[in-house]
Amino acid sequence: MKVLVTGGAGYIGSHTIRELVRTGKHEVVAVDNLSKGHAAAVTSGATLEQGDIRDSGFIEGVFARHKPDAVMHFSASIVVPDSVRDPLSYFDNNVCGTVTLLRTMVKHNCKYFIFSSTAALFANPKTIPIPSDEERIPMSPYGDTKLVVENILKWSEDAYGVKHVCLRYFNACGADEHGDIGEDHEPETHLIPIILQVPLGKRQHVKIFGTDYPTDDGTAVRDYVHVTDLATAHIKALDFMVTKNRSGRFNLGSGKGYSVREIVEAARRVTGHPIPAVEEARREGDPAILIASSKDAEEQLGWTRRFDSVEKILETAWRFHQKHPTGMH
Ligand SMILES: NC(=O)c1ccc[n+]([C@@H]2O[C@H](COP(=O)([O-])OP(=O)(O)OC[C@H]3O[C@@H](n4cnc5c(N)ncnc54)[C@H](O)[C@@H]3O)[C@@H](O)[C@H]2O)c1
Ligand SMILES: O=c1ccn([C@@H]2O[C@H](COP(=O)(O)OP(=O)(O)O[C@H]3O[C@H](CO)[C@@H](O)[C@H](O)[C@H]3O)[C@@H](O)[C@H]2O)c(=O)[nH]1
């Protein structure tokens, strides 16, 4: 199939393009405005179209030139605290951008859509591990933009027949095993790349945000899932939509939770560096525990994970950061 990947120069998009090209079955066009992503992250074998998905003339041209059969939609603004400070820009990029994209898809009769949704839909889950049918109550404008798009997709299926799969990633981490692409955000807010900046000599210590959570060691618990495993979930989701002609919503994680302190400990083991840690107050908007049940994705998509330990995940991230101490540039 011909697959259009928005946000294809970003972290998860570039890893998914790598896996799509590896299958040898798909032709891939990446779309990215390079506001955050890196052209060098787009695997050779895929074409990069530079532009903004909110620019209807640009996106119309891309559809007219490439005639994609399916869209994987990664592009978004992704920093939760920024979304609290400036919700309108988050709704503009994450919701208005998606509407422009969907309108163009419908016009060009493109019927398959995979959406990067998030664990940030679940501020206060009743069940842990969190099943895919847990009530969606976001705690931030960022999470709310993703909820709005999930709802837009439901109505778009009813009205225009767009089949869609919403994949709710928990904490994406790690890097392609070859170490040539990986996580490189500026500024970096995610725990694992921040921790690895200490042994790289870019930071003196890591801050632990909150030590009074109702968890075993008082620090917040998250479900860390390898980016290449997330990438393969997209390929499974595409097969699912096309062969079963169905839509779905799936939580994607490892089913295991690790506290911030446990991740710092694991990074000390993997890097051999003492990685000093300083305790700080809680970061605003952080839930205590987010762990996914991926049962639906396993049963319905046939999704399996290759990276089942945080050490393995950290090793791939560490390899990338050692090879690229100044990032993808
Ligand atoms: N990283 C995580 O842990 C995580 C977890 C859950 C969900 N997600 C979702 O996954 C998706 C990808 O996340 P990521 O970590 O790869 O982010 P990223 O910032 O690395 O990638 C997003 C890419 O989209 C591009 N982009 C942004 N707005 C654009 C626009 N208007 N037009 C064209 N390109 C645009 C950026 O330049 C960037 O390359 C996002 O939708 C995010 O909300 C990420
Ligand atoms: O320097 C740091 C950075 C983070 N943390 C903590 O580490 C945990 C994980 O934080 P982070 O890596 O920023 O991920 P999350 O806040 O859990 O959110 C990520 O994962 C969500 C899905 O769970 C996505 O929706 C978001 O886009 C993505 O930022 C949280 O408890 C943070 O408070 C620290 O203690 N110190």
Image (cartoon, helix red, strand yellow):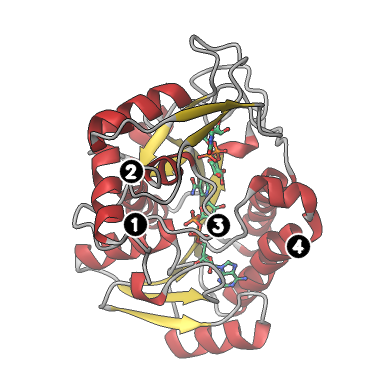
Residue 26 versus residue 295 in the image, above or below: below
Locate residue 167, reporting x and y percent.
49, 46
- Report the amino acid beneath label 1: Gly
Name the residue at 39% across, 29% down: 264
Spatial CA span between label 4 and label 2: 35 Å
- Report the amino acid beneath label 2: Pro
Tell me which corner region of the image, top left, top right, bottom left or bottom right, holds residue 194.
top left
- Report the amino acid beneath label 4: Ser
Spatial CA span between label 3 and label 4: 17 Å
Residue 233 versus residue 185 in the image, above or below: above
Disc 3 designates what residue? 187
Q: Secondary structure at mark 3?
A: loop
**First reached walking from the N terminus: tag 4 or tag 1:** 4
Dot in front, 3 or 2? 2
Locate residue 13, reporting x and y percent.
42, 61
Do tag 3 and tag 2 residues touch (Cβ < 8 Å)?
no
Instruction: Depth check: give the residue in front, 80 or 54.
Output: 80
Disc 2 designates what residue? 199
Dot in front, 4 or 1? 1
Q: Secondary structure at mark 1?
A: loop
Instruction: Depth check: give the residue in front, 261 or 163.
Output: 261
Disc 4 designates what residue? 89
Q: Secondary structure at mark 4?
A: helix
**First reached walking from the N terminus: tag 3 or tag 1:** 1
Locate residue 187, reporting x and y percent.
55, 57
**First reached walking from the N terminus: tag 4 or tag 2:** 4
Name the residue at 30% across, 62% down: 324
Per the rendering, the mark at residue 182 is 1
Name the residue at 50% across, 44% down: 190
